Image (tube, grey):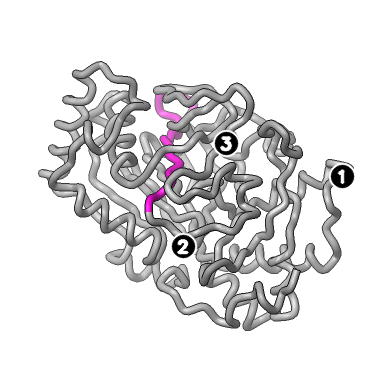
Amino acid sequence: MDTKRSLPPSIIDTPSAWYGHEMAKNTDIWLTYLLAEEVSELENAAVKFQSGDLDLGLISKENFPLPLLAPRLRDLRDKLMHGIGFELIRGLPVSDYSQKMAATIFCGIGAHLGRPRSQNAAGHILGHVRDLGLNANDAGTRIYQTSQRQTFHTDSTDVVGLMCLRSAKEGGQSLLVSTVTIYNEMQRQRPDLVAELFKSVATDRRGEVPTGQKAYFEIPVLNWHQGFLTGIYQRQYVNSAQRFPDAPRLTRTQLEALDFFDSLANDPRLHLSMQLQPGDMQFVYNHALMHDRTAFVDWPEPDKRRHLLRLWLSLPDDRPLPDCFRQRYGSIEIGNRGGIIVEGTKLNVPLDADG
């Protein structure tokens, strides 16, 4: 690979290149509130959709009309792709809703932003983020199924959306960091390591392997393509991919680069921390940001335990992705890419799930 041609400028100036300590002082940039009339519009649209007895997987902006909120959601999509890369929307009274009602509203909003994608081999386009008591060190476990600290990572889709139904007793904070800012800081502090991040690394699929593919994919952590810096990363899965005998070995220099990349992501100056409250909806652009979650202690009562709904969305009019992303995304067609599809996967919308 010709790294001279594939590396971006030494410093990238873009709205998504922000610092967490500055964002924490300027919440008006990313924290927004639903108006009472917008909440009413969402509730009415959900009631009408449910009255038609349609499967939630068939929800669309046509059968979930939001004339009042739709322009705001178009602005949100632009903010994700071309702005700071995230937003937190507050003010939905989910404690008043059934889980089906909350899911209908969330999926309806998602339909106005993009197209839902499968989040696992089971074809779930609505995910349930809960602690299932699994071991994060088990090679078959997806980290979101535990209460343990994650690491900064991206999901295999353009945008990840979360709706908080219930928060944990303690902890479980959401962390965001700009991949572009990390790149800029590496150029300032350790320019000798930057090129290592543009070399392919093996990342474990955790048992969710598409037909004809390896048990891991090989994509660089950072990719410079048609004027965009795009990240794809999950350190825990990079580490566990080394269990495969045919996976390329990480060199000492690559490990040093990944360790420094991680240290910058964990720098409090760089990342932003927020606590999601019931009713909050957070949308994050995976190509420009990474996200994380701190460890948490849950409530002993099952009906009080932490529970988030999740959407993976492919956006129309989004940035192009390099060809190597086909290994993970299946297709790189704009508006119809990303997600996890294996043999036998059928898309479905579980209103409740144990996995």
Determine the residue positioned at 31% across, 66% down: 29
Residue behind mark 3: 340
| Residue type for callout 2 | Leu
Give residue 49's quadrant in the image: top left
Q: Are the residues flagged by discs 3 and 2 in contact, CB closer than 8 Å?
A: no
Q: Provide the residue span drawn in magenta.
A: 300-316
> How many numbered marks have been drawn onto this rendered protein structure?
3
Residue behind mark 2: 272
User: Marks 2 and 1, Cα distance to the nearest angstrom?
Assistant: 37 Å
Q: Residues within 10 Å of mark 1 (few under 14, many from 20)?
A: few
Q: Residues within 10 Å of mark 3 (few under 14, many from 20)?
A: many
User: Marks 3 and 1, Cα distance to the nearest angstrom?
Assistant: 22 Å
- Numbered label attached to residue 246: 1
Question: What kind of element bears circle 2?
Answer: strand
Instruction: Tell me if residue 139 is in the magenta stretch.
Output: no
**Whether residue 355 can be seen here:** no
Q: Which label lies toward us, 2 or 1?
A: 1
Determine the residue positioned at 74% across, 73% down: 2
Q: Residue furthest left?
A: 37
* x and y percentages locating residue 150 in the rendered image: 60, 47
Lower sequence index among marks 2 and 1: 1
